[in-house]
Amino acid sequence: MKLPSINIENMDIKLNLEGIVLNVLYVKFGYFYRTMPEHSHSQNSYELHYIPAGQGTLYAQGNRYAITPGTIYVTGPEVAHEQIPHPEDPMAEYCIFFEILPSNSVSPLVKRTYVKEPSLPELLRSTPFWIGLDSGKLLELFEMLAEELSLEQAGVHHMATNLLEMIVIRLIRQYRKNHASTQSLPLKTLDDSRLLMIENSFLYHYDSITLQQLADQLGLSTRQTERMVYKQYGMPFKDKKLQARMGAASRLLLTTDTSVSGIAAQAGYATPEQFSNAFKKYYGMTATGYRSLRGVQ
């Protein structure tokens, strides 16, 4: 099955969802050939993952889930997750990354007097993690979105916005049906791009990123950068970097046979002793003791 590609990065798209505004940071399609390291998103940020083909494993909040064609899952704020593709049948994925904008960005609520339905914003905010098999025919909407983008005709921004709103709404409707859970064109703003830079820095460069390096990438002072990180994650830069390093290290301990010294180097520590001390302080046990948990998972 040939799946249509989608790549929306520079188009400024805002989705209206019953009184809240979702700022779409990107929409992408691709195949997973390598593991996506464990990571979590900032406050008010969500990723919608739709898997139309392929297989793999999702680790989320300490639990393991099998991914098969038709799986859809949402990872919201501070939901630690990692995707591992099947080596012989890698996952294809449509991914929508969006954030809920502050209340002062909300457009006036349209009054309805003839339909009573559950609040979509309430369902989204109250469900930071959800996984299930799609029953909303989302692939049809992604195919329509890909076709619309390829045409590059007048009204493409309006059509893309409408289709993305339909995708998000059809997803949230499934929350109540499936209880597997334990959410020239106008260009993106500078702060949107900065949020993606911050997310990617902690996801891919947790071993080496410094506050000064991140500030240089963002074009901000270190004080402004520290405030921006705290606003997004509710913790200072050093704590978020430590969380990213420890998350990556813990997953390597449980899923690989890499030595503790090798993991220390991958996590960016100068010596195994520094890593061991930091790991024990963070998790309350040694790295070797943590690895022994692999046999009981």
Image: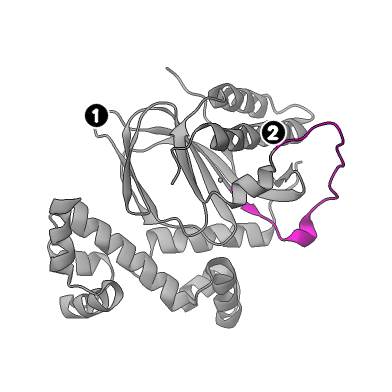
Q: Amino acid at mark 1?
A: Glu
Q: Which mark, residue 160? A: 2
| Quarter assignment of residue 209 | bottom left
* Position of the N terminus by quadrant: top left
Residue 43 percent coordinates (x, y): 56, 62
CA gap, disc 1 and disc 2: 33 Å
Q: Residue at x 85, y 31 (%)?
A: 114
Residue 9 percent coordinates (x, y): 60, 45
Q: Secondary structure at mark 1?
A: loop
Q: Main secondary structure of the magenta part?
A: loop
Q: Nearer the viewer, residue 256 or 195?
A: 256
Residue 81 percent coordinates (x, y): 39, 51
Disc 2 residue crowd, few under 14, some 14–19, many 20+, Cα 10 Å: some
Q: Is residue 274 above or below residue 219?
A: below
Disc 1 residue crowd, few under 14, some 14–19, many 20+, Cα 10 Å: few
Q: Residue at x 52, y 29 (%)?
A: 5
| Quarter assignment of residue 26 | top right
Image-based side of 202 in relation to 175, left or right: left
Q: Residue furthest top?
A: 1
Q: Is residue 266 magenta?
A: no
Q: Is residue 115 magenta?
A: yes
Q: Residue at x 24, y 29 (%)?
A: 88
Residue 100 percent coordinates (x, y): 66, 54
- Give whichever of discs 1 and 2 has the lower sequence position: 1
Residues shaded magenta: 98-117
- Which residue is disc 1 drawn over? 88
Q: Which mark, residue 100? A: none
Q: Are marks 1 and 2 in contact (CB under 8 Å)?
A: no
Q: Amino acid at mark 2?
A: Ala
- Residue 210 in sight: no
